Amino acid sequence: MNRRKNDFLVRPKRIRCYTQLSTLPIDLIIEILSRLPMNSIAICRLVSKQWASILQSSDFTESFLIKSPPRPRLLFTIRYGSKWHLFSAPQPRNFDENFPVVATDYHKGFSGNWCMQSFQLVNGFIYLNNRLSLKGKIDRVSVIWNPSTGQQIPLPDLGVKNSHSKSFFGYDPIEKQFKVLCITSSKEHQVLTLGTGRKLSWRKIEYSYPHYPRKKSNGICINGVLYYRNTNAMIVRFDVRSEEFRFVEIKMYVEILSLINYKGKLGVLFPNTDLAQLWVLDDTNKVEWSKHNFVFPDTTFEAIRATDTGEMFCASSCWRDSLYVSYYDLEKESVKKVKIKGIEDKLSIGKHHANEFFIFPNHVENVMVL
């Protein structure tokens, strides 16, 4: 507001203070930026090379995780029309929490002939394959993708001709390294390490027992260890850090439905007439299992997964008006149903079904750039 003094018009002075980012200590810059939400961090990476460098540093990643500890979410991948769509919703942290309706966040829509059966989710990063038609042949391109930052890393060709392959994605929490293990039908074992700063390349590793995984085994990474199926009575255990193999025998001669992370331990799901049976590997050295039988109403056993706190859950692959996720508490033997809102509105599904639908537990946002 203007004021008069001795009949003269006096205008207030506006004082502006500018502080260049380069004059601030790096620790202070990291402290400030680590308090920003994830979507703001993605924008800040575009401000300057200096900001991008800071936001890609391991110091910033660690600071962000301390300030904003990740809360696991359910990740929904849906093919509707000609595109895939990615949504997420919070996982219950306490089975007694009462929120019958949960809203989803929409992350991205993307085109391509993606094979979701190859989809593997590890510490906020996703491994998946895109099928491409090149010169009349169907080729497969593997990609590591971080939906939080948008970073996509195409993996180099394995360089093995006339051979099928199966890959598994793992993370070592001690060295903080992501690795891809690939096994070919010629029993060749190769590993690719991400985030080294060098050109990506495959390297052969030694193994004592040649094997090839089952086709339908995507595997699961739990606390730095990859598990996948070899035969009906054998599970392979691959230590991501030491790159050593061990084999876990299962004296249950029926088809394994899936491997799950049950409270930080390997869980194996088996069908048992109208029941599902869960085996939990309590001791990896002695190979000791605890066994649980349960009934999950209105679902197929193949769709059952587990949250990080041990609740079994499933969702119907077909819905029209609303999508529901059912949670089952093994200890209390109780079921809770949660309504998932936002997907049908965003995609305008209406009376139509989604072409394909997959749900994955325990997704966390990760600001790391590989």
Image: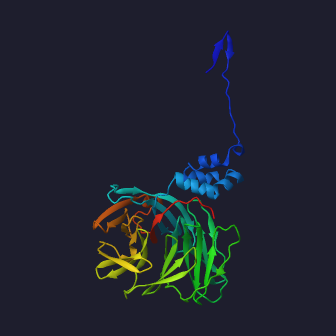
In front: 173, or 19? 173
Image coords of residue 32 (percent x, y): 60, 46
Image coords of residue 64 (percent x, y): 56, 54
At 50% from the left and 64% from the top, the residue drawn is 86
Asked if residue 53 is positioned above or below residue 9 in the image, the reply reads below
Image coords of residue 226 (percent x, y): 51, 76
- Residue 295 figure quarter: bottom left
At 59% from the left and 80% from the top, the residue drawn is 182
Left or right side of 46 for 358: left
Residue ranking furthest to the front: 286
Q: Is residue 113 visible?
A: no
In front: 2, or 207? 207
Left or right side of 300 for 148: right
In front: 349, or 284? 284
Image coords of residue 253 (percent x, y): 37, 88
Asked if residue 78 is positioned above or below residue 286 in the image, the reply reads above
